[in-house]
Image (cartoon, helix red, strand yellow):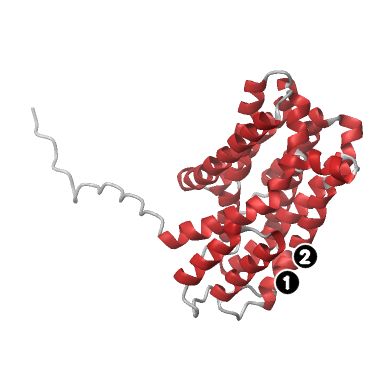
Amino acid sequence: MANPAPSSGPPPRAPAPAAPLPGLLWLFAACNFVIGTGAFGMTGYLGPVADGLGVSVGAAGQTMTVYALANAVLAPLLMALTARWPRAWVMQGALGLLAGGSLGVAALLIGWLLHRRLRADMDAGGTSLRGIGTVLRQRDVVLALLLTLLYFTGIFVVTACMGPVQLALNPLTPGGLSALLAGIGAAGVMGTLGGGWAADQLGPRRTIALLLTCLLLTMIAVPWTAGHLAWTAIAFAVWTVCGFGLMTPQQSRLAEVAFTQAPLLLSLNASMVYIGTALGSAIGGAAIPVLGFERLAWLGAAFVAAALLTLAVNTVPPRPR
C-alpha cells in the first residue's frame, strides 16, 4: 500500500481569537445607552403621559415625532458645523446639554468619564456635508438609505406607543409592564451584539435579508398572540433582536457601498433612522383609531416588506475599498 503523499506547505493556522473590545468602546456604548434611554424611555409610559395631559395616546405619541424630526434635521448640521472641533469637546458638550435638559445623574457621570478618558486633541475626522449631492446620485446608496428609512418607520409604528400596545394585547399591572419592557430592552442588547457577529459570519447583505425576513414574520404574528402573555413576550423579544441587530450590518453595508464616503453615509443613515422614527410615530398615531393598538404591527409589517424589496432590487456589488 502506497504511503500518502506528503502535504505541501505548512498546515493551516487556526483563526486568531477575537480581540476584546477596548475599554473606551465600552464607554462609547454607555453613552449610547444613556442617550437612548432618555430618548425612547417615554414609549413605555405614554399612557400615563396622555392621561396627565388630557389628550389621546396618539396625540401624546407625536412627541416622538417632534423629537425624531429635530434629530434628523439638526444632527447632520451640528456634525458638520463641529467637524473641526475636538471630538472630546463635542461629546462632552452634547452630554452636558442632555443632562441639563433632562436633569439626568447618568449623563453627567458619562460626561465626567469621557473627560477623564478622552484626549482633548483626539480627532475622529469629523463629518462634512461636502459631496452629499454626488453621494445621493448613486442608486445603490439611495436604496441602502431607503432600507433604513422603511424598516425604522415600520418598527416605530408600534414602538412609539409600546406600552399601550402591550396593554392592549395582555392585561398587565404597572410592575408587569415594566418587567416586560425591561426584558424586551435586554433582547435589544443581544440583537446589537448578535447582528455584528452575524455580519462577520454571513456578510452584511445576507444578515440584513435574514433579520428583515424574521422581523416581517414576527410582526405578522404579533396580533395573534393577544391573550397569551408568554407568546407576546417571545414575539417582541425576537422583534427586538432583529430590529437592533440590523444596525451593525447596515452600517457595514453602507461602508462597503462607498468606503471613502463612509462618515457622510453614516451621518445620512442616522438621519434616516430619525426620519423613520418620526414617520412611524406619526403614522402609527393616526392609525390607532382604525386598527387599534393590537393590530398596529400589521401596518408596520408593510413597511418592513418594502424594506426587503429595496434589498431585492439593489443588486449592485460593493465597490472595492
Expressed as whole percent of the image width and height from the top left, the position of residue 57 reads 85, 40
In this figure, which residue is indicated by the disc labeled 1?
Answer: 77
Visible residue check, residue 192: yes
Q: Establish if 3 lies above or below 256.
A: above
Three-letter amino acid code at the position of disc 2? Val
Q: Residues within 10 Å of mark 1 (few under 14, many from 20)?
A: some
Which one is in front, 177 or 234?
Answer: 177
Type of residue at label 1?
Leu
Q: Could you tell me how many numbered marks the image carries?
A: 2
Q: Which image quarter: residue 294?
A: top right
Q: Quadrant of the N terminus?
A: top left
Q: Please, what secondary structure does the residue beneath circle 1 have?
A: helix
Which of 218/142 is in front? 218
Q: Which residue is mark 2?
A: 73
* Residue 320 at x, y percent in the picture: 52, 62
Position of 286 compared to 87: left or right?
Answer: right
Is residue 131 something that shows in the picture? Answer: no
Q: In this rendering, would 281 be left or right of 253?
A: right
Q: Position of residue 9 (x, y in %)?
A: 19, 51
